[in-house]
Amino acid sequence: MLKWLVKFGLWPRWALNRANCFKGWILSEKAREVGLTKPDFTEAAAPGGEARPQKILVVDDEILNRKLIQAMLKPQGYEVNLAVDGADCLAQVEENPPDLILMDIMMPNMNGFEVVAELKARPHLALIPVVMVTALQDINDRVKALEVGADDFLTKPVDRMELRARVRSLLKVKAYNDHMANYQRELEHEVAKRTEEVRQAHSKLRYASLETIFRLARAAEYKDEDTGAHLISMSRISAYLAERLGLNQTVVDRILYASPMHDIGKIGIPDRILTKNGPLNDEEWGIMRMHPIFGGQILEGSDIGFLSLGEVISLTHHEKWDGSGYPHGLAGTQIPLAGRIVAVADVFDALRSKRPYKPPLTMEQTVDIIRAGRGTHFDPQVVDILLDNLDGVVKLWDEAQASHHAGLQQSSLNPDPIHA
């Protein structure tokens, strides 16, 4: 009957097309009910998972339009969901993101342009392709749709074959984009994993190197039973003073790990001098004063930061602010700052510790001697920093003694005895 009405101009052809689409939807639904149709297009399954139908969201304020498009696409195996307006669309997309959106333009409250602009403004939704389905023919409307982020157009009334072709094409693009996004995430995860493995390996190697250096420094003073505590306390105090002086963390760490090598040159000094009970004579002092030179020779030529700094500290920690020190008689700022810092920390610990030639001094006696050496033996600024932070220095020294006597620096659980 409708065909005769169209033939005589009494019924528009687009209405016939829509009626045929609606009839086709009814027939397809009845066929599905009796099992005569089945999905023939599903998204590829992830490894170890099951394939799922690709999801399409149809957004239109007219129920007939929504149902017609659904009828055209369901027989192809797609999961077709429906939204009645823009707000419903945004809510559904957030909860259950589709693979493709078919969007009407002329809708109440929030038109299709506004919905697409909002979708594209959300980074986690921006890659979902959107097809504008509209009866609007004005080129300006199409340009506006592209400007807000639409990916394609379909003109109402929708042709079934064109709809299916556009949907297949855009779903392939979406699948490729998803594949690339997943590949990028997997790649970033693998890079992060490998980077962490390298970091851990580097950390273990660093700790192994530092412990080796620490033990070699102990070997140089092996005849002194309190050497372990001395190396720990003077290195921590040196780093503490460097930090209070405002040096950056890289320099502070290098001083922490380089300072235990300050007396490594003692390995070249005879035991009879190192372990002598009582003061050294002039000849013995001449030999003892060679240990900074020996240490510098042992450590010279390295391009590793804390070993290079260890050479500087070994050569300069016995220099004095007034130029009366050894081995080169440097004065004032001619002495590298690291050497001036270690000089104070080394003497502080030596005064507080038992030596073959003397008993330990009290804290009051130690502070008096350090203060008396300000501007002659020691850099005044370093002395002031020590005195201004005496509580922190004393705490570090006490902890080093306790750690040493408890044998904690030997623990395999603590590969970094200096920084523990």
Image (spheres, rainbow, N blue to C red):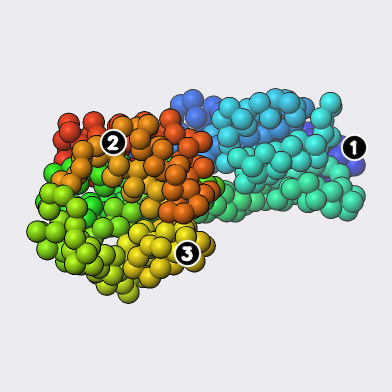
| The one of 19 and 230 positioned closer to us in this rendering | 230
| Kind of residue indicated by mark 3 | Ala
The answer to which image quadrant residue 221 occupies is bottom left
Q: What element carries label 2?
A: loop
Is residue 234 in view from this perspective?
A: yes
Residue at screen point 38% across, 70% down: 328
Residue at screen point 28% across, 45% down: 350
Q: In the rendering, which numbered label is found on residue 10?
A: 1
Measure the C-alpha gap from mark 1 to mark 3: 112 Å
| Kind of residue indicated by mark 1 | Leu
| The one of 329 and 207 positioned closer to us in this rendering | 329
Tell me the crowding category of disc 3: few under 14, some 14 to 19, or many 20 or more residues within 10 angstroms, Cα based: some
Q: In this view, does 409 lie above or below 200?
A: above
Q: Position of residue 11 (x, y in %)?
A: 86, 37
| The one of 199 and 410 positioned closer to us in this rendering | 410
The C terminus appears in which quarter of the rendering? top left
Measure the C-alpha gap from mark 2 to mark 3: 28 Å
Q: Is residue 73 above or below residue 261?
A: above
Dot 2 or dot 3: first in sequence order is 3
Q: In the rendering, which numbered label is found on residue 390?
A: none
The answer to which image quadrant residue 300 occupies is bottom left
Q: What element carries label 1?
A: loop
The answer to which image quadrant residue 292 occupies is bottom left
| Kind of residue indicated by mark 2 | Leu
Q: Which of marks 1 and 2 is in front?
A: 2
Q: Position of residue 223 (x, y in %)?
A: 11, 51
Q: Is residue 392 above or below residue 273?
A: above
Measure the C-alpha gap from mark 1 to mark 2: 118 Å
Tell me the crowding category of disc 1: few under 14, some 14 to 19, or many 20 or more residues within 10 angstroms, Cα based: few
Q: Mark 2 points at which residue?
A: 361
